[in-house]
Image (spheres, rainbow, N blue to C red):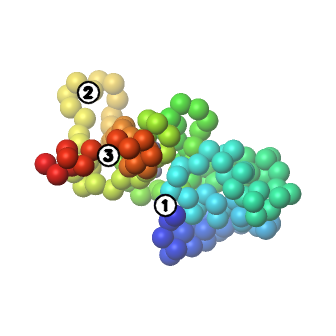
Amino acid sequence: MPVAHDEMERRVEEMKDALRARGMRLTHQRIEVVREIAGSEAHPDAETIYRNVRTRIPTISRDTVYRTAATLVELGCVTRTTLTHGPVRYDANLEHHHHFVCMRCGAAHDIVDPALDKVRASASSAGIGSVETVEVRLRGVCTECERSTGTTRRSRRKT
Ligand SMILES: [Zn+2]
Ligand SMILES: [Zn+2]
């Protein structure tokens, strides 16, 4: 699912401002990396970003992708997340949100759900440290995977 156009442009401008403030030249290549990260809800890893940008700029180097992504993390424009086993993934959604992670294909979807926002750490976690934010991770099988294997549970959904 692509990010809504306005939201994507807002993110792109924010990232460009931050890179500029850092003294980085806004090359065509860097801007394409920025657009790829800002426009994706898929929480891509660096390799996926590289593959996608390469379809538009065949000469882009892996190094440019990795370094631009790392700089965006440093600047606080993007967060690093490990939603699944494997490489670190990038999340350009800075609003507080939760995730649904598909255990079959590894897809990670953002969830904004006031009910999940109400989850609080209980006394059992007291003593470990002070909690600043709670993120809930739902694990399951995404509808696309369910569809492709023909295991839609329509009957169960009706109830
Ligand atoms: Zn899936
Ligand atoms: Zn996310």
Q: Residues within 10 Å of mark 1 (few under 14, many from 20)?
A: few
Q: Which residue lies at the image location 27% right of the left edge and 27% below the top edge?
A: 125
Element at label 2:
loop
Residue 107 position in % (x across, y down): 49, 45
Report the residue marked by disc 3. 152
Amino acid found under the numbered disc labelled 3: Thr
Q: Is 85 left, or right, of 119 in this rendering?
A: right
Amino acid found under the numbered disc labelled 2: Ala
State which mark lies toward you, 3 or 1: 3
- Looking at the image, tell me whether mark 3 or mark 1 is earlier in sequence order: 1
In front here: 136 or 152?
Answer: 152
In front here: 137 or 125?
Answer: 137
Report the residue marked by disc 1. 1
Determine contact: label 2, label 3, CB under 8 Å: no
Q: Which residue lies at the image location 33% right of the left edge and 34% below the top edge?
A: 130
Which numbered disc covers residue 126? Answer: 2
State which mark lies toward you, 1 or 2: 1
Note whether residue 57 is visible.
yes
Cβ(mark 3) to ligand 1 < 8 Å?
no
Amino acid found under the numbered disc labelled 1: Met
Q: Which residue lies at the image location 49% right of the left edge and 60% below the top edge?
A: 1
In front here: 68 or 35?
Answer: 35
Q: In which quadrant of the rendered view does residue 113 lie? A: bottom left
From what the image shows, is residue 106 above or below residue 95? above
Q: Is 19 left, or right, of 129 in this rendering?
A: right
CA separation in Å, label 2 and label 3:
41 Å
Q: Residue furthest left?
A: 159
Q: Residues within 10 Å of mark 2 (few under 14, many from 20)?
A: few
CA separation in Å, label 3 and label 1:
20 Å
Note whether residue 71 is visible.
no
